[in-house]
Image (cartoon, helix red, strand yellow):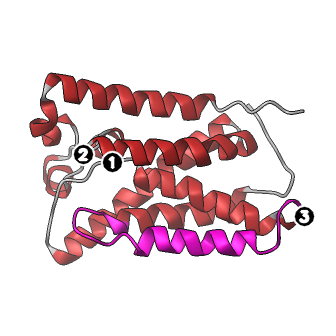
Amino acid sequence: MRRNNATVTYILIALNVIIYVFMTVSGHFDQIEAAGAMYVPAVLYDHQWYRVITSMFLHADFRHIANNMIMLLVVGYSIEERFGHIKYLICYFIGGIGATALSSWWEMHLNNYSLGVGASGAIMCVFAIMVVMNIKDRSNFDKTVGIRMLLVLALMVFGNMGPGINWMAHLGGAICGLIFGVLLYRKKHYMTY
């Protein structure tokens, strides 16, 4: 039996938790912008491109990080096993970057800017990959599982459009994940690195 090796997922969770604990203990939450939160004007006008990545490791509160890390553990575990460490990590970061790009475009379109933090865009990418895997790999799953998961994905994106929720980032991550799933996943093809 194949042993699941989710090293990258565990490292990502550990980094997020360590940064959150540091921000909490040091009292730096009031300086979250200085810590690297995504802020479109700072990126465009001050060329602080690092914010695209650093914002993925910052979270607003305990509920925010707990939800994201539980979701990452659940979906990341499976995707990392099937894609391998390197492909998984690339998909995770490109998904997060794609999420930030779509969210930033939307803010520029509205001319309304806010601070953005969280790993949810990258996690939505990973979840969307899992949706595609379930649709493509019908021999291992009930034929309706993939369609049900697609509906769950849609609810996760469009059902969380309230204040303080960056649903455009969720949509951007989901779009990246659907593309990666279609292009990279092959039925019963498990590659490790």
Badge 1 density bin: few <14, some 14–19, many ≥20, Cα 10 Å: some
Q: Which residue is mark 2?
A: 60
At a point 61% along the width and 65% down the height, the residue shown is 179
Query: Which amino acid, by three-letter code, is at mark 3?
Result: Ser
Residue visible at 73% across and 31% down in the picture: 193
Q: Is residue 56 visible?
A: no
Asked if residue 84 shows in the view, the reply is yes
Q: CA distance from mark 2 to mark 3?
A: 41 Å
What's the residue at 66%, 73% (across, down)? 148
Up/down of 64 relative to 9, above or below: below
Categorize mark 2 by other alpha carbons within 10 Å: few (<14), some (14-19), many (20+).
Answer: some
Density class for disc 3 (Cα within 10 Å; few <14, some 14-19, many ≥20) is few
> Which of the 4 image quarters holds residue 107?
bottom left
Q: Secondary structure at mark 3?
A: helix
Viewer-nearest of discs 1 and 3:
1
The range drawn in magenta is 140-168
Amino acid beneath label 1: His
Image location of residue 183, percent across then percent down: 70, 62
Verify CB contact (< 8 Å) between mark 2 and mark 3: no
Q: Earlier in the sequence, mark 1 or mark 3?
A: 1
